[in-house]
């Protein structure tokens, strides 16, 4: 009776089902290999061995076992099934001088090229050049398969695959055979005598009614073209996982989104995590944020991250030495007192902000004893105690070739698990320890190879310290990082600023030295670990320095202009050590900071400007305002000039006191000004910075008084007119 069922995902170390839903009907079992039909495509699917079929090769068989395969596999006198025999059936026909291999037998296959004669080696599928597989008659009939139909063959241990054709018939009780060429394409030893595999590791999917039929041997390009179409219809290459678990040996990947050129506030980082198309899927994703303090890269341990490359001459103050002789040696942390059985250097770390933590470092254990060991405590609550209070501990033993898992309760060690591993003395390793504080599972990796795990049914859910430990050895540590878990392909918020809760706490030291870094690493369900990816970030939290002075005119400050179509200004430099000054912007208005005459305009890097095509108003004051913008887009405060007044009649204006014999004093004043002038008649007017006339009087002697005591502090302009002569001067009311 046929059985209809659906296979779903499961996973084990290095094996997986891809995420597909299968609809298979069981057909039969041959040599303990189950054969299925896929619904509704009708494809035949099975996982089996692969023996090598040399048939069809012009040198497959020859006298005295001179061919690629044993002659007995082609038959014997009176019963030759694998080669062309003479009319009597007693003797194989030998190839002639015009054939590829004179003196060898003519080997046959079920599929032929009808353009050639029976005794011509070119009539048959050459096992060395054509990818083909062999089927017994029961599989052919049950699957409605015809000679020449196309199939997909996949090696579950290597991940290699190849499209092939059904080209030869095999024994009824045998399943799993392929050509020399097919074996070579999928990573199976193609030797016809000693190669192949008896293990059930080769998947075969046969597409019924897909070939050219008897009489035509298609090219590889034609086989591939048909195969791709049929495989996509069946559900894609991952459909092989419907037959059974597929070996996943490909590392997953992780990509960090491209950052902005500069960051000035907290931002989200996006991650794209992926496994290979038929892989086990990304199971764990981690990230780490670090920052550059001007001397070294660190990480905020209160945020659950840690980073130390041990590149400075002294150990960072984050670490506290309890026991042992710890120092920096050749850019690595080193404890070199081999007489001590329990050394201790610890650091604070907040360990309750994510479900999982990944601890990663390079380590080397050396020395001269026979009980050399070193390890790492995590989720500690009291690092000053002998065994660090309550915590977990992973212990690497060189001389016993074992990795030990300990749980420490009330400072008492308990060995909870041990797994064999090889730790060679004086050899650097990359070690990773992953702890899930929710499930209690601890995993250990050495050089990204999974070593073993332990799951605590009563997990420690919070910790405040980490500690390195050694016993009777020299223990060196480098490139120590702590990562936090995140959702797969999710984003993470990064806080920046000079605060205790910020992930990136510093600004760029200069435009070309990034102040932030994010790392990402992922692990798939088959425990393959990705390469660590990193991305630098430019941080600028400070506005550019204020522009100290804006002068009206081209050099020193002027108060009056006589050109009614242009205004000029120049200013001092602004600076920004973090990202540098990108541009200056200027505006012109009738009040300081206003832009009613010329809107804010990018002036590039120039610190002077000449604005043209203006229409200025007589006796109106104009102000040039300037701000700088750094490369991060942050602006300085606006600085405005003290203004310049446009006078329409320039020829009769007397610009010097000595010429006009005029003196206005005191200036600045609280509001009362005295004017001494040689004029005996004339007019006096005073306008404010907006051009409004606020005082008007006549000159009737050589000394006059201006009373602005009721006016607010600021800059005002006095104009004296005597006939056609005009004099203008700036005065300042300052109470």
Image: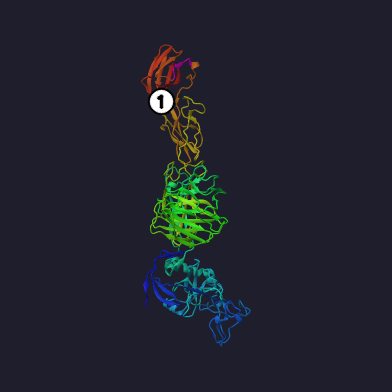
Q: Could you say where residue 159 lies in the image, as x and y percent from the top left? A: 49, 66
Q: Could you say where residue 163 lies in the image, as x and y percent from the top left? A: 49, 69
Q: Quadrant of the N terminus?
A: bottom left
Q: Tell me, yes or no, whether the highlighted magenta stretch contains residue 662.
A: yes
Residue 257 seen from this side: no
Quadrant of res 24: bottom left
Side of 18 where 471 appears, left or right: right
Judge whether 555 appears above or below 62 on screen.
above
Segment tinted magenta in the rendering: 660-667
Side of 87 where 716 appears, left or right: left
Q: Tell me, yes or no, whether the highlighted magenta stretch contains residue 710.
A: no
Judge whether 667 appears above or below 121 on screen.
above
Judge whether 92 appears above or below 316 on screen.
below
**Is the residue marked by circle 1 packed among few (<14), some (14-19), or many (20+) residues within 10 Å?**
many
Judge whether 256 appears above or below 22 on screen.
above
Colour pattern: rainbow
Quadrant of res 102: bottom right
Q: Could you say where residue 466 lies in the image, as x and y percent from the top left? A: 46, 50
Q: Could you say where residue 254 lies in the image, as x and y percent from the top left? A: 47, 55
Q: Which residue is disc 1 drawn over?
A: 689
Viewer-side residue, 577 vs 78: 577
Q: Quadrant of the C terminus?
A: top left
Residue 402 seen from this side: yes
Residue sitting farthest toward the right: 97
Mark 1 lies on a secondary structure that is: loop
């Amino acid at each position: 009776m046929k059985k209809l069922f659906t296979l779903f995902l499961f996973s084990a170390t290095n094996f997986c089902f891809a995420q597909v839903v299968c609809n298979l009907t069981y057909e039969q079992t041959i040599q303990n290999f189950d054969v299925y039909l896929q619904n509704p495509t009708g494809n035949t699917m099975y996982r089996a061995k692969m023996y090598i079929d040399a048939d069809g090769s012009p040198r497959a068989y020859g006298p005295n076992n001179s061919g690629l395969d044993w002659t007995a596999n082609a038959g014997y006198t009176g019963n030759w099934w694998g080669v062309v025999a003479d009319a009597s059936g007693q003797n194989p026909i030998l190839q002639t001088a015009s054939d590829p291999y004179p003196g060898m037998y003519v080997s046959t296959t079920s599929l032929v090229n009808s353009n050639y004669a029976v005794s011509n080696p070119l009539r048959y599928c050459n096992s060395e050049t054509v990818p083909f597989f062999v089927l017994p008659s029961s599989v052919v009939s049950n699957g409605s398969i015809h000679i020449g139909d196309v199939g997909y063959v996949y090696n579950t241990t290597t991940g290699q695959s190849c499209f092939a054709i059904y080209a030869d018939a095999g024994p009824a009780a045998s399943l799993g055979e392929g050509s020399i060429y097919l074996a070579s394409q999928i990573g199976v030893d193609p030797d016809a005598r000693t190669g192949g595999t008896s293990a059930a590791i080769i998947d075969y999917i046969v597409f019924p009614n897909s070939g050219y039929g008897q009489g035509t041997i298609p090219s590889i390009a034609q086989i591939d073209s048909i195969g791709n179409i049929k495989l996509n219809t069946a559900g894609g290459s991952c459909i092989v996982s419907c037959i059974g678990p597929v070996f996943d040996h490909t590392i997953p990947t992780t990509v960090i989104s491209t950052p902005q050129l500069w960051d000035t506030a907290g931002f989200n980082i996006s991650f794209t995590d992926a496994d290979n198309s038929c892989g086990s899927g990304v199971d764990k994703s981690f990230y780490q944020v670090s920052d550059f303090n001007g001397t070294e890269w660190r990480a905020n341990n209160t945020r659950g991250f840690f980073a130390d490359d041990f590149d400075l001459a002294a150990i960072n103050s984050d670490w506290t030495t309890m026991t042992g002789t710890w120092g920096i040696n050749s850019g690595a942390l080193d404890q070199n007192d081999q007489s001590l059985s329990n050394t201790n250097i610890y650091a604070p770390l907040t360990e309750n902000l994510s479900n999982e933590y990944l601890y990663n470092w390079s380590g080397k254990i050396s020395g001269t004893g026979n009980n050399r060991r070193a390890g790492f405590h995590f989720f500690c609550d009291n690092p000053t105690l002998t065994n660090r209070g309550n915590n977990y501990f992973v212990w690497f033993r060189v001389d016993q070739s074992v990795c030990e898992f300990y749980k420490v309760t009330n400072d008492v060690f308990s060995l909870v698990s041990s797994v064999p591993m090889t730790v060679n003395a004086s050899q650097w390793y990359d070690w990773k320890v992953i702890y899930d504080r929710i499930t209690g599972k601890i995993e250990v990796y050495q050089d990204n190879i999974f070593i073993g795990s332990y799951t605590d049914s009563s997990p420690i859910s919070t910790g405040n310290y980490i500690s390195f430990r050694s016993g009777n050895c020299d223990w060196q540590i480098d490139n120590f990082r702590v990562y936090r878990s995140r959702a797969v392909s999710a984003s993470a918020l990064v806080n920046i600023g000079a605060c205790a809760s910020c992930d990136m706490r510093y600004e760029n030291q200069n435009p070309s030295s990034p102040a932030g870094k994010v790392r990402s690493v992922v692990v798939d369900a088959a425990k393959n670990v990705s390469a660590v990816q990193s991305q630098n970030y430019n941080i600028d939290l400070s506005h550019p320095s204020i522009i100290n002075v804006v002068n009206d005119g081209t050099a020193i400050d002027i108060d009056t202009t006589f050109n009614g179509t242009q205004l000029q200004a120049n200013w001092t430099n602004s600076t920004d050590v973090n990202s540098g000054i990108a541009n200056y912007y200027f505006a012109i208005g009738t009040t300081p900071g206003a832009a009613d005459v010329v809107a804010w305009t990018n002036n590039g890097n120039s610190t002077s400007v000449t604005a043209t095509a203006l229409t200025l108003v007589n006796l109106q004051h104009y102000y040039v305002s300037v701000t700088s913008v750094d490369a991060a887009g942050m602006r300085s405060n606006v600085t405005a000039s003290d203004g310049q007044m446009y006078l329409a009649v320039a020829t009769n204006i007397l610009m010097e006191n000595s010429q006009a014999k005029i003196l206005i004093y005191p200036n600045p004043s609280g509001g009362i000004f005295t004017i001494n002038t040689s004029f005996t008649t004339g007019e006096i007017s005073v306008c404010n910075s907006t051009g409004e006339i606020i005082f008007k009087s006549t000159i009737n002697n050589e000394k006059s008084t201006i009373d602005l005591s009721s006016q607010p502090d600021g800059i005002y302009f006095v104009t004296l007119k005597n006939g056609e002569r005009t004099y203008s001067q700036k005065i300042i009311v300052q109470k």
